[in-house]
Image (cartoon, rainbow, N blue to C red):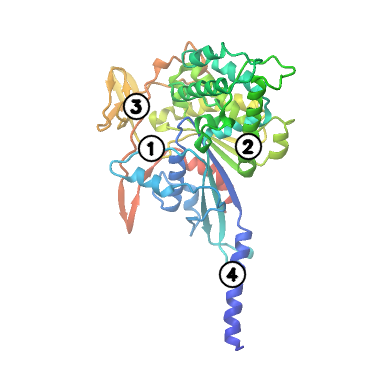
């Protein structure tokens, strides 16, 4: 073989070997993204990817501007058995005319985002390789995270907690049909499939009503009752909480049937998700709709706090748990984001973070969650409003201007979804603890509404670039990833 040919073949081999080695030594961070009660995780992922890959973030990600030659792009995801996050479809929805919020995802999905920058010294530069960081974004429903707590519970323990929640005053009207049904059930009686089916139906109706109410409760589950998918009608979803006395259980009783199906749910639905996905997550962001909880007053915030305790119990189970032994301390950074920060004036963002921080700190303490780095962030992944400040009769009022969605109401006013409006939602308490005080945190103190997405400004700069207004997206990125950048 001639020398030039040998040189070409050798060069080709070395180039591909270098690429292979480069892939092997490229660090990968798996980011778990979940949201509680329509908190905006789809928009968060879309905004993060768009701002990194296409630019235009306003305000910009300050840290990235100092890395010369950095670029971001999407690559094929590593897990072929997980649906791809439909980034392009969601972005099109937000950039359409008129813009609209994308449909919430109802199943797990994944996207690989790669950051790449030129090497400055060391082995990478010697080999002519760029440095890269893979960010594998794993998007999953918040209900699935709550379900992880079931892995460490018996049916009796779950029933006791579920019934305590159902009987709370905030849910008295919503839970009435299920509680009336439960009063007619004899758990020690002979197993009856129709009783199991009817009980599961009524309990699921309660879960759906609670989630859709003005006081959403983040910790209610099981999650697949709300998002059954192809499991709808399965016996694994046909159980409900009952009062149990403990002790021996008759094998042919209704209680035995419910216990068996609860165990099947844990084994065949919850555990596979944990083993295949959650146990591999390095970092986690939990999106929380704090404003909806505030609309429910002190009781709404306490319900949110209990829900976050369930989140923390899943992320950081108690030390004697077998789940803690398997999971270990892999998740080393956890961000909690109070979403829809654009629904209040920027002067209230600190209070919004403080209220969430207060809820998380209590939950973290009870869940023995020390050991991971935590941060609470006021977030609007796509800012739909602008701030407004007015002085009326000597009183300083801070509000926001945007286009409320059709059907939204404040008092007797109903919005049509086409015209802009200035909204003064009310002042958040200076002391976060006041928000948990029944005498100081009545729901009528606040007037939060949902806003349409903004019409994104287009600027000419060689190519069209969308100005992407946001609140806190840069802070979330910095906390979750900047320790892996040069």
Q: Quadrant of the C terminus?
A: bottom right
Mark 1 residue crowding within 10 angstroms, few (<14) / some (14–19) / many (20+): many
Marks 3 and 2 sit apart, C-alpha to C-alpha, by 49 Å
Instruction: Name the secondary structure under disc 4.
Output: helix
Query: Relative to 429, does residue 226 appear above or below in the rendering?
Result: below
User: Which comes sooner in the sequence, label 1 or label 3?
Assistant: 1
Instruction: Name the secondary structure under disc 3.
Output: strand
Marks 2 and 1 sit apart, C-alpha to C-alpha, by 40 Å
Q: Are marks 4 and 2 in contact (CB under 8 Å)?
A: no
Which of the two marks, 4 or 3, is nearer to us in this view? 4
Q: Is residue 448 visible?
A: yes
Q: Which residue is mark 2?
A: 268
Q: Which residue is mark 3?
A: 399
Instruction: Name the secondary structure under disc 1.
Output: loop
Looking at the rendered structure, which numbered label has been put on residue 16?
Answer: 4
Q: Position of residue 195 (x, y in %)?
A: 56, 20
Q: Which residue is mark 1?
A: 383
Q: Residue 451 occupies which quadrant of the picture?
A: top left
Q: Is residue 57 visible?
A: no
Q: Are marks 1 and 4 in contact (CB under 8 Å)?
A: no
User: Which comes sooner in the sequence, label 4 or label 3?
Assistant: 4
Mark 3 residue crowding within 10 angstroms, few (<14) / some (14–19) / many (20+): many
Marks 1 and 3 sit apart, C-alpha to C-alpha, by 14 Å
């Amino acid at each position: 073989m001639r020398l030039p040919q040998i040189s070409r073949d050798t060069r080709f081999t070395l180039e591909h070997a270098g690429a292979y080695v480069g892939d092997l030594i490229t660090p990968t961070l798996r980011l778990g993204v979940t949201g509680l009660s329509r908190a905006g995780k789809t928009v968060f992922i879309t905004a993060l990817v768009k701002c990194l890959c296409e630019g235009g973030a306003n305000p910009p990600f300050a840290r990235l501007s100092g890395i010369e030659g950095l670029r971001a792009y999407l690559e094929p995801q590593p897990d072929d058995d997980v649906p791809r996050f439909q980034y392009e479809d969601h972005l099109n929805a937000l950039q359409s005319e008129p813009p609209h919020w994308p449909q919430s995802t109802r199943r797990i999905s994944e996207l690989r985002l790669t950051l790449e920058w030129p090497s400055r010294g060391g082995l990478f530069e010697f080999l002519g390789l760029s440095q890269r960081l893979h960010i594998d974004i794993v998007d999953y429903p918040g209900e699935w995270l709550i379900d992880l707590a079931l892995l460490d519970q018996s049916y009796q323990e779950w029933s006791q907690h579920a019934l305590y929640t159902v009987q709370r005053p905030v849910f008295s009207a919503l839970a009435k049909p299920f509680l009336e049904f439960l009063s007619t059930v004899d758990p020690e009686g002979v197993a009856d499939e129709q009783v199991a089916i009817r009980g599961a139906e009524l309990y699921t109706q309660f879960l759906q009503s609670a989630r859709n109410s003005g006081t959403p409760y983040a910790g209610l589950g099981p999650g697949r009752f709300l998002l059954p998918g192809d499991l709808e009608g399965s016996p694994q979803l046909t159980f409900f909480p009952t009062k149990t006395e403990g002790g021996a259980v008759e094998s042919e009783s209704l209680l035995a049937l419910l216990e068996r199906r609860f165990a099947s749910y844990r084994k065949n639905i919850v555990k596979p998700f944990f083993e295949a996905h959650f146990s591999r997550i390095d970092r986690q962001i939990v999106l929380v709709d704090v404003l909806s909880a505030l609309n429910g007053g002190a009781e709404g915030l306490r319900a949110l706090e209990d829900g976050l305790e369930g989140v923390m119990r899943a992320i950081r189970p108690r030390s004697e748990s077998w789940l803690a032994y398997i999971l270990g301390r892999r998740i080393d950074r956890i961000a909690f984001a109070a979403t829809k920060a654009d629904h209040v004036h920027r002067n209230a963002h600190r209070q919004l973070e403080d209220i969430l921080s207060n809820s998380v700190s209590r939950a973290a303490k009870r869940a023995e969650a020390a050991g991971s780095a935590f941060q609470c962030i006021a977030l609007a992944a796509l800012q739909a409003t602008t701030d407004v400040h007015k002085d009326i009769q000597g009183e300083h009022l801070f509000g926001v201007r945007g286009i409320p969605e059709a059907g939204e109401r404040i008092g007797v006013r109903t919005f049509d979804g086409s015209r802009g409006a200035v909204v003064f939602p009310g002042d958040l308490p200076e002391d976060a603890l006041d928000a948990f005080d029944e005498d100081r945190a009545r729901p009528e103190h606040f007037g939060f509404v949902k806003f349409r997405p903004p019409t994104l400004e287009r600027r000419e700069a060689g190519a069209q670039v969308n100005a992407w207004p946001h609140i806190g997206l840069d802070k979330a990125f910095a906390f979750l990833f900047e320790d892996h950048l040069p």
